[in-house]
Amino acid sequence: MSSEQITLRAEAGRSTGSRASRRLRREGNVPAVVYGREIEPIAISVDHRELRAALTTEAGTNALINLEVGGERILTLPRIVETHPYRREIRHVDFVTVALTDRVAAEIPVHLVGAAIGIEAGGVLSTARTVVQIEALVTNIPSYVELDISALGIGDALRIGDLPEIEGVTYTDDPTSTVVSITVPTLEVEPEEEAEELAEGEGAEGAVSEGEEGEETAEGGAEGEAGE
Protein backbone atom coordinates (compact mmCIF):
# COMPACT_ATOMS: atom_id res chain seq x y z
CA MET A 1 0.00 0.00 0.00
CA SER A 2 1.07 3.60 -0.58
CA SER A 3 0.35 4.95 2.92
CA GLU A 4 3.98 6.07 3.35
CA GLN A 5 4.37 9.80 2.84
CA ILE A 6 7.29 11.34 0.97
CA THR A 7 8.54 14.83 1.77
CA LEU A 8 9.55 16.99 -1.18
CA ARG A 9 10.96 20.50 -0.93
CA ALA A 10 9.35 23.10 -3.18
CA GLU A 11 10.06 26.74 -3.97
CA ALA A 12 7.11 29.09 -4.39
CA GLY A 13 7.00 32.33 -6.36
CA ARG A 14 8.51 31.07 -9.60
CA SER A 15 8.01 33.06 -12.77
CA THR A 16 5.53 31.58 -15.21
CA GLY A 17 5.78 31.31 -18.98
CA SER A 18 7.72 29.09 -21.37
CA ARG A 19 10.96 31.08 -21.17
CA ALA A 20 11.04 30.95 -17.36
CA SER A 21 10.17 27.23 -17.43
CA ARG A 22 13.05 26.49 -19.81
CA ARG A 23 15.44 28.33 -17.51
CA LEU A 24 14.23 26.30 -14.52
CA ARG A 25 14.77 23.04 -16.38
CA ARG A 26 18.29 24.06 -17.38
CA GLU A 27 19.00 24.63 -13.69
CA GLY A 28 17.82 21.11 -12.82
CA ASN A 29 14.38 22.06 -11.54
CA VAL A 30 10.84 21.21 -12.65
CA PRO A 31 8.05 23.81 -12.93
CA ALA A 32 4.91 22.65 -11.13
CA VAL A 33 1.64 23.86 -9.67
CA VAL A 34 -0.27 22.80 -6.56
CA TYR A 35 -4.02 23.33 -6.23
CA GLY A 36 -7.12 21.84 -4.62
CA ARG A 37 -9.87 22.51 -2.12
CA GLU A 38 -9.56 25.67 -0.05
CA ILE A 39 -6.26 26.66 -1.66
CA GLU A 40 -5.41 29.09 -4.42
CA PRO A 41 -3.18 27.57 -7.13
CA ILE A 42 0.50 28.07 -6.27
CA ALA A 43 3.20 28.07 -8.95
CA ILE A 44 6.17 26.14 -7.54
CA SER A 45 9.37 24.45 -8.64
CA VAL A 46 10.94 21.23 -7.34
CA ASP A 47 14.32 19.63 -7.78
CA HIS A 48 14.25 17.22 -10.74
CA ARG A 49 16.36 14.55 -9.05
CA GLU A 50 14.31 14.61 -5.83
CA LEU A 51 11.05 14.54 -7.80
CA ARG A 52 12.16 11.57 -9.90
CA ALA A 53 13.12 9.69 -6.73
CA ALA A 54 9.69 10.43 -5.25
CA LEU A 55 7.86 9.17 -8.35
CA THR A 56 9.89 5.98 -8.84
CA THR A 57 8.96 4.29 -5.57
CA GLU A 58 6.63 1.28 -5.64
CA ALA A 59 3.68 3.67 -5.37
CA GLY A 60 4.68 5.52 -8.55
CA THR A 61 2.41 8.46 -9.35
CA ASN A 62 0.07 7.38 -6.54
CA ALA A 63 2.67 8.39 -3.95
CA LEU A 64 1.51 10.64 -1.15
CA ILE A 65 3.79 13.65 -1.28
CA ASN A 66 4.15 16.25 1.45
CA LEU A 67 5.24 19.44 -0.29
CA GLU A 68 7.28 21.75 1.94
CA VAL A 69 6.37 25.21 0.69
CA GLY A 70 7.45 28.28 2.64
CA GLY A 71 7.58 26.49 5.97
CA GLU A 72 4.20 24.84 5.42
CA ARG A 73 3.48 21.20 4.55
CA ILE A 74 0.81 20.44 1.95
CA LEU A 75 -0.30 16.82 1.47
CA THR A 76 -0.73 16.08 -2.24
CA LEU A 77 -0.96 13.48 -4.97
CA PRO A 78 0.86 14.05 -8.28
CA ARG A 79 -1.95 13.85 -10.80
CA ILE A 80 -0.67 15.19 -14.13
CA VAL A 81 2.96 14.36 -14.87
CA GLU A 82 4.25 15.71 -18.18
CA THR A 83 7.39 13.99 -19.47
CA HIS A 84 9.69 14.61 -22.42
CA PRO A 85 8.69 12.52 -25.47
CA TYR A 86 12.03 10.69 -25.69
CA ARG A 87 14.28 11.83 -22.83
CA ARG A 88 14.00 10.71 -19.22
CA GLU A 89 12.95 14.17 -18.20
CA ILE A 90 9.95 15.34 -16.17
CA ARG A 91 8.81 18.66 -17.61
CA HIS A 92 5.85 19.67 -15.44
CA VAL A 93 3.70 18.32 -12.60
CA ASP A 94 0.27 19.15 -11.22
CA PHE A 95 -0.01 18.38 -7.51
CA VAL A 96 -3.54 18.07 -6.11
CA THR A 97 -4.16 18.59 -2.40
CA VAL A 98 -5.76 15.71 -0.47
CA ALA A 99 -6.75 14.78 3.07
CA LEU A 100 -5.99 11.43 4.69
CA THR A 101 -9.72 10.68 4.80
CA ASP A 102 -10.28 11.31 1.07
CA ARG A 103 -11.30 8.59 -1.35
CA VAL A 104 -9.77 9.26 -4.75
CA ALA A 105 -9.70 7.79 -8.23
CA ALA A 106 -6.42 6.17 -9.23
CA GLU A 107 -4.88 3.95 -11.87
CA ILE A 108 -2.85 0.88 -10.87
CA PRO A 109 -0.98 -1.71 -12.96
CA VAL A 110 -2.07 -5.33 -13.36
CA HIS A 111 0.67 -7.91 -12.72
CA LEU A 112 0.03 -11.29 -14.36
CA VAL A 113 1.25 -14.28 -12.36
CA GLY A 114 1.45 -17.98 -13.19
CA ALA A 115 1.92 -19.95 -16.40
CA ALA A 116 -1.30 -20.35 -18.38
CA ILE A 117 -2.06 -23.94 -19.46
CA GLY A 118 -3.31 -22.54 -22.76
CA ILE A 119 0.14 -21.19 -23.61
CA GLU A 120 1.70 -24.60 -22.94
CA ALA A 121 -0.90 -26.04 -25.33
CA GLY A 122 0.19 -23.66 -28.08
CA GLY A 123 -2.11 -20.71 -27.44
CA VAL A 124 -1.08 -17.04 -27.55
CA LEU A 125 -1.34 -14.68 -24.59
CA SER A 126 -3.30 -11.55 -25.53
CA THR A 127 -3.21 -8.69 -23.01
CA ALA A 128 -6.08 -6.25 -23.49
CA ARG A 129 -5.10 -3.91 -20.65
CA THR A 130 -2.16 -3.46 -18.31
CA VAL A 131 -3.78 -0.99 -15.89
CA VAL A 132 -7.16 -0.68 -14.16
CA GLN A 133 -9.08 2.22 -12.65
CA ILE A 134 -9.93 2.10 -8.95
CA GLU A 135 -11.28 4.19 -6.11
CA ALA A 136 -9.75 4.02 -2.63
CA LEU A 137 -8.61 6.02 0.37
CA VAL A 138 -5.44 7.98 -0.38
CA THR A 139 -3.70 5.89 2.27
CA ASN A 140 -4.96 2.62 0.80
CA ILE A 141 -4.08 2.80 -2.91
CA PRO A 142 -2.42 -0.49 -3.92
CA SER A 143 0.83 -0.34 -5.85
CA TYR A 144 -0.58 -3.03 -8.19
CA VAL A 145 -3.06 -5.90 -8.38
CA GLU A 146 -2.03 -9.49 -9.17
CA LEU A 147 -4.07 -11.64 -11.56
CA ASP A 148 -3.42 -15.40 -11.63
CA ILE A 149 -3.64 -16.72 -15.21
CA SER A 150 -2.58 -20.32 -14.46
CA ALA A 151 -5.99 -21.88 -15.25
CA LEU A 152 -6.48 -20.05 -18.56
CA GLY A 153 -6.94 -22.41 -21.50
CA ILE A 154 -7.18 -21.65 -25.21
CA GLY A 155 -10.27 -19.52 -25.78
CA ASP A 156 -10.51 -18.46 -22.12
CA ALA A 157 -10.42 -14.88 -20.83
CA LEU A 158 -10.24 -13.02 -17.52
CA ARG A 159 -12.16 -9.79 -17.04
CA ILE A 160 -12.26 -6.87 -14.61
CA GLY A 161 -14.85 -8.81 -12.61
CA ASP A 162 -12.30 -11.62 -12.12
CA LEU A 163 -9.74 -9.39 -10.40
CA PRO A 164 -9.17 -10.29 -6.73
CA GLU A 165 -11.00 -8.27 -4.11
CA ILE A 166 -8.88 -5.78 -2.18
CA GLU A 167 -10.27 -4.43 1.07
CA GLY A 168 -11.29 -0.81 0.74
CA VAL A 169 -10.71 -0.76 -3.03
CA THR A 170 -13.42 -0.49 -5.71
CA TYR A 171 -12.77 -1.28 -9.37
CA THR A 172 -14.50 1.38 -11.46
CA ASP A 173 -14.00 -0.13 -14.94
CA ASP A 174 -16.71 -2.17 -16.67
CA PRO A 175 -16.61 -5.60 -14.95
CA THR A 176 -17.12 -7.33 -18.31
CA SER A 177 -14.09 -5.63 -19.87
CA THR A 178 -11.41 -8.16 -20.86
CA VAL A 179 -8.03 -7.95 -19.17
CA VAL A 180 -6.25 -10.96 -20.68
CA SER A 181 -7.13 -13.92 -22.91
CA ILE A 182 -5.56 -16.94 -24.61
CA THR A 183 -6.19 -17.03 -28.34
CA VAL A 184 -5.65 -19.61 -31.07
CA PRO A 185 -2.41 -18.90 -32.95
CA THR A 186 -2.82 -17.54 -36.48
CA LEU A 187 -1.77 -20.05 -39.14
CA GLU A 188 1.02 -18.55 -41.21
CA VAL A 189 1.59 -19.80 -44.76
CA GLU A 190 5.25 -20.25 -45.59
CA PRO A 191 6.50 -18.28 -48.64
CA GLU A 192 7.61 -21.52 -50.35
CA GLU A 193 4.12 -23.00 -49.98
CA GLU A 194 2.59 -19.82 -51.41
CA ALA A 195 4.95 -19.98 -54.39
CA GLU A 196 4.12 -23.65 -55.03
CA GLU A 197 0.38 -22.97 -54.85
CA LEU A 198 0.76 -20.04 -57.23
CA ALA A 199 2.79 -22.12 -59.68
CA GLU A 200 0.24 -24.94 -59.58
CA GLY A 201 -2.56 -22.45 -60.19
CA GLU A 202 -0.78 -20.92 -63.18
CA GLY A 203 -0.10 -24.37 -64.60
CA ALA A 204 -3.73 -25.34 -64.34
CA GLU A 205 -4.84 -22.11 -66.00
CA GLY A 206 -2.33 -22.67 -68.78
CA ALA A 207 -3.64 -26.18 -69.40
CA VAL A 208 -7.22 -24.97 -69.60
CA SER A 209 -6.24 -22.17 -71.99
CA GLU A 210 -4.45 -24.56 -74.29
CA GLY A 211 -7.44 -26.90 -74.28
CA GLU A 212 -9.82 -24.08 -75.02
CA GLU A 213 -7.57 -22.84 -77.81
CA GLY A 214 -7.50 -26.29 -79.38
CA GLU A 215 -11.29 -26.52 -79.23
CA GLU A 216 -11.61 -23.10 -80.87
CA THR A 217 -9.24 -24.19 -83.68
CA ALA A 218 -11.13 -27.39 -84.24
CA GLU A 219 -14.45 -25.54 -84.32
CA GLY A 220 -13.00 -23.02 -86.74
CA GLY A 221 -11.82 -25.82 -89.01
CA ALA A 222 -15.18 -27.52 -88.95
CA GLU A 223 -16.97 -24.30 -89.81
CA GLY A 224 -14.57 -23.74 -92.69
CA GLU A 225 -15.21 -27.20 -94.14
CA ALA A 226 -18.95 -26.68 -93.81
CA GLY A 227 -18.72 -23.37 -95.63
CA GLU A 228 -16.78 -24.89 -98.48
Image (cartoon, grey):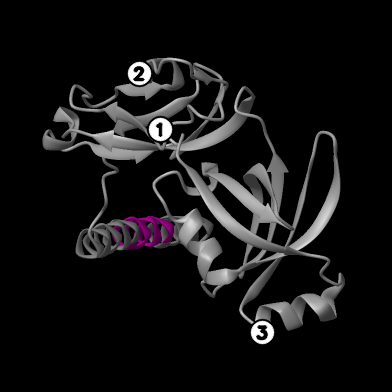
Find out whether the residues at labels 1 and 2 contact each other: C-beta distance under 8 Å: no
Report the disc number at residue 164.
2
Say what secondary structure mark 1 lies in. loop
Say what secondary structure mark 2 lies in. loop
The prevailing secondary structure element of the residues shown in magenta is helix
Residues 111 and 19: in front is 19
Residue 20 seen in the current view: yes
Q: Is residue 18 above or below residue 150?
A: below
Report the disc number at residue 62.
none
**Spot occupied by residue 48 in the image (x, y as percentages of width and height):** 57, 70
- Which is more N-terminal, label 3 or label 1? 1
Q: Which residue is drawn at the image coordinates 64% and 24% (left, top)?
A: 102
Report the disc number at residue 26.
3
Residues 186 and 170: in front is 170
Nearest to viewer (mark 1 / mark 2): 1
Say what secondary structure mark 3 lies in. helix
What type is the residue that disc 1 sits on?
A: Met
Residues 64 and 12: in front is 12
**Spot occupied by residue 190 in the image (x, y as percentages of width and height):** 22, 59
Is-magenta flag for residue 214?
Answer: yes
Label 1 crowd (10 A; few <14 / some 14-19 / many >=20) = some
In the image, taking residue 42 as reference, residue 149 lies left or right, namely left
Q: Is residue 204 above or below residue 126?
A: below
Q: Is residue 91 above or below residue 151?
A: below
Residue 89 seen in the current view: no
Q: What span is colored magenta in the figure?
A: 206-216
In space, the residues marked 3 and 2 are separated at their CA atoms by: 45 Å
Q: Quadrant of the N terminus?
A: top left
The residue labelled by disc 1 is 1
**Spot occupied by residue 57 in the image (x, y as percentages of width and height):** 41, 51
Q: Which residue is drawn at the image coordinates 52% and 65% (left, top)?
A: 50
Q: Quadrant of residue 207?
A: bottom left
